[in-house]
Image (cartoon, helix red, strand yellow):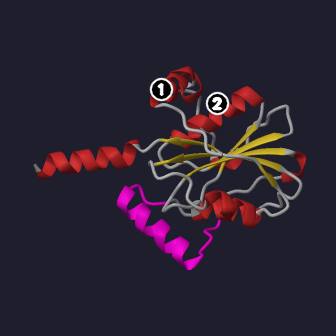
Amino acid sequence: MQIQIPRRKFLKALSLAAADLAAPAENNASQARSGSSGTLVAYFSRTGNTKLIARQIRGARGATLFEINPGNPYPEDYVETVAQASQETGAGYLPPLKTSVADVRRYDTIYLGFPIWGMTAPPVVRSFLRGHDLSGKIIHPFITHGGYGLGDSIDIVRSIAPGADVRPAFSMEADQERRTLEQVTGWLSG
């Protein structure tokens, strides 16, 4: 089951979460913010769309927030990132993570957020799944995409975390970066 959110509702949620986004960024040594529940919100975000949703979930669930980051950051340039992600996915390469969740055993529920890259889960998210034993955990995927849907991402999550209970995903189209680049390119060539 795929849940779609209209852009207007997303923008309303964005304005409600603006104060949270203004909070100081986590430093890499202590990215996980402790919550009082057995809930973890682990996310990877390139442009901030997925991060926005992750922070909203953290606030609503009193959860611990963990940002999934590769050891070597992806390029700033969108086209370069797409090319690198495509090469990594094609080769089955799993980039090393910058940090891992210190004690994933203390969490019963994990909200796992990521954007769709090339109709699948990004390699860095696969690294996160491989690097943590999520057996017996409930996983709630939340996914942003550029309009093409979830691809095989849920099958990937299930295959890498076979002992987890993967629930239906929340997904939302959030393709502003791609659309903006296309519009600016069209304007510049016109």
Cα distance, mark 2 to mark 1?
Answer: 13 Å
Question: Which tag is nearer the camera, tag 2 or tag 1?
Answer: 1
Residue labelled with disc 2: 56
Q: Is residue 103 visible?
A: no
Q: Find the magenta span and give its range.
A: 74-98
Q: Is residue 139 magenta?
A: no
Query: Secondary structure under badge 1?
Result: helix
Residue in view at x 89 percent, y 52 percent: 105
Residue labelled with disc 1: 11
Q: Nearer the viewer, residue 118 or 56?
A: 118
145 to 133, vertically: above or below:
above
Residue in view at x 75 percent, y 47 percent: 167
Outermost residue toward the left in this view = 190
Q: Earlier in the sequence, mark 2 or mark 1?
A: 1
Q: Provide residue 171's location: percent of width, then percent of height.
A: 58, 43
57 to 43, vertically: above or below:
above
Rate crowding at label 1 as few (under 14), some (14 to 19) or many (20 or more) other CA atoms within 10 Å.
Answer: few
Residue in view at x 67 percent, y 65 percent: 127
Q: Is residue 76 visible?
A: yes
Residue in view at x 25 percent, y 45 percent: 183
Query: Secondary structure under badge 2?
Result: helix
| Badge 2 amino acid | Gln
Rate crowding at label 2 as few (under 14), some (14 to 19) or many (20 or more) other CA atoms within 10 Å.
Answer: some
| Badge 1 amino acid | Leu
